Image (cartoon, helix red, strand yellow):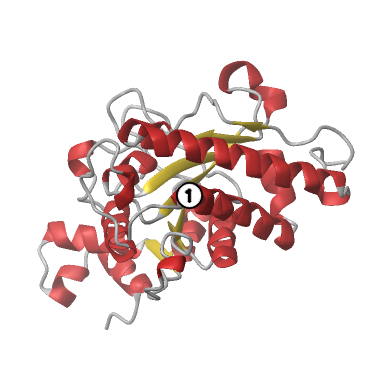
Amino acid sequence: RLEGPSDVRRASLFGHLARATGLDDALCALAGELASVEVTGAFPTDTDPNRRPRERLLFTAPHGIFVTREGERAHVPEEWTTLLATSFARATGGVSVTWSQPERARSKLLRQPDPRLQDPNRVEPSRALGYGWGLALERLAGDAGTSPGTSRGMSSTRACLHVDIHGRRDPSTSASDIGPGDCDIGAAALEDADPALGRRLRAAMGRRLRAFLDAWTREGGDGAGSEGGSEDAFAVNEDPVLTGRRPDGMWTLSQQGTALGLASVQIELSLRLRRRLRKDEAAMAGFARALADAWVECSEGLAN
């Protein structure tokens, strides 16, 4: 008996799913992969035009487990990104997509990737809709009312903000190679598809996140940038090295989202910022609301 995603995943891993369902090997593998993905929340169905884009926010965290990358070393988990994505979605009434709790537990225990799972942030364009995360993203884009295959400049079809949450190293150890930010806003994928909206959204997010982080820092305590709580403020970088667009022809999750008609942006958060946010539920909500407010500002006038 298969009573939930964990049972499907387990049956797929041990080769029992075909016997239980009658599916062929390829579909069994895909079912097992889908069962490792967790979608939390749902987009509102209210058709009130005043709620149209403002209430549709999607947060993803693709690097909550060890993932394999062909020809490269395994990508290690980015701490607290799963927690932040789900918390941001909850604070804004949005949706989150993460690796499932059993998959995260398996990864933490074994400390190595499952070679059967695709890194969602490094996907061949031809496979973008043929693996677990891609299928989940496609379904959610449809639920949000986006129009895949939008042409350049047609921002009116982007009915949902998609924020892909990542972790970066602290600026004290990585400023020389990936820049000085604690919060990097990578909108290159969106700017390629919709230059005007991408530029506006990147600027609005930078302005609102900087205002929130500055106010949080001034309050003291958990708002300060250092573990001791008294040193540098958190820096927002709207022109980061990590832009959300890969230079090697592979697609990031924000490139996949943009291709599906989402307004996708990649946010890279330093370890010190993630550590401080995860201890402060009100701060996580405030950070999420700053992103939502930026989307409200930039989505004014977009069609349903």
Q: In the image, what residue type sits under mark 1?
A: Ile
**Which residue is rendered at x = 29% and y = 62% of the image?**
145
Q: Is residue 68 left or right of residue 174?
A: left
Compared to 189, does 53 lie above or below?
A: below
Q: Is residue 39 left or right of residue 135?
A: right
Q: Residue 283: percent from the left, percent from the top?
A: 72, 56
* Disc 1 element: loop
Q: Is residue 81 visible?
A: yes
The quadrant the N terminus occupies is bottom left
Compared to 209, does 11 lie above or below?
A: below
**Which residue is rendered at x = 55% and y = 35% of the image?**
203
Q: Residue 256: percent from the left, percent from the top?
A: 31, 43
- Residue wearing tag 1: 65
Compared to 260, does 98 lie above or below?
A: below
The quadrant the C terminus occupies is bottom left
Q: Quadrant of residue 16?
A: bottom left
